[in-house]
Image (spheres, rainbow, N blue to C red):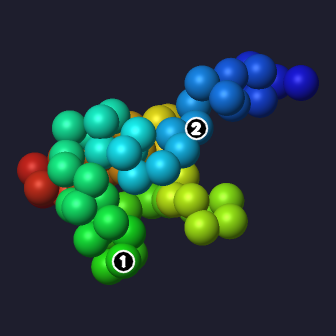
Amino acid sequence: MNANNDNLSVDILRGADAIAAHLGFPRRAVYHAVSKGNLPHFRIGETVCARKSTLSAWISEQEQSAAA
């Protein structure tokens, strides 16, 4: 097992509330971004989920795009 799989439970945010708290956004903004396809996410059943590591990489990409 690699290091990424060892910390999978720590890396996954389950639910819009958890994602919103991690990003510092209102929960409603998370749902809006998800519905527009503007936020990297996946679903487990009907629950919106995201990886902290994926969100961090996505934020870095957004910063680089804005600076260009």
Q: Which residue matches tag 1?
A: 35
Tell me residue 44's x, y (percent).
Answer: 67, 59
* Residue at the image point whose x is 77% and y is 29% from the top: 5
Question: Which part of the image, by quadrant, shows the N terminus?
Answer: top right
Disc 1 or 2, which lies upstream in sequence? 2
- For the residue pair 67 and 47, the one nearer the viewer reads as 47
Element class at badge 1: helix
Q: Quadrant of residue 40?
A: bottom left
* Residue at the image point whose x is 58% and y is 38% from the top: 12
Tell me residue 20's x, y (percent).
Answer: 30, 45
Q: Amino acid at mark 2?
A: Ile
Q: How many marks?
A: 2
Tell me residue 26's x, y (percent).
Answer: 19, 50
User: Among all residues in the image, which is located at the extreme right?
Assistant: 1
Q: Quadrant of residue 32?
A: bottom left
Q: Residues within 10 Å of mark 2 (few under 14, many from 20)?
A: some
Residue 38, above or below 6: below
* Residue at the image point whose x is 12% and y is 55% from the top: 66
Q: Is residue 11 visible?
A: yes
Element class at badge 2: strand
Q: Measure the alpha-carbon separation of dots 1 and 2.
A: 19 Å
User: Among all residues in the image, which is located at the extreme bottom?
Assistant: 36
Q: Residues within 10 Å of mark 1 (few under 14, many from 20)?
A: few
Tell me residue 13's x, y (percent).
Answer: 51, 40
Residue 14, above or below 9: below
Q: Which mark is residue 12?
A: 2
Residue 65, above or below 59: below
Q: Amino acid at mark 1?
A: Ser
Q: Is residue 50 visible?
A: no
- For the residue pair 9 and 61, the one nearer the viewer reads as 9
* Residue at the image point whose x is 60% and y is 67% from the top: 46
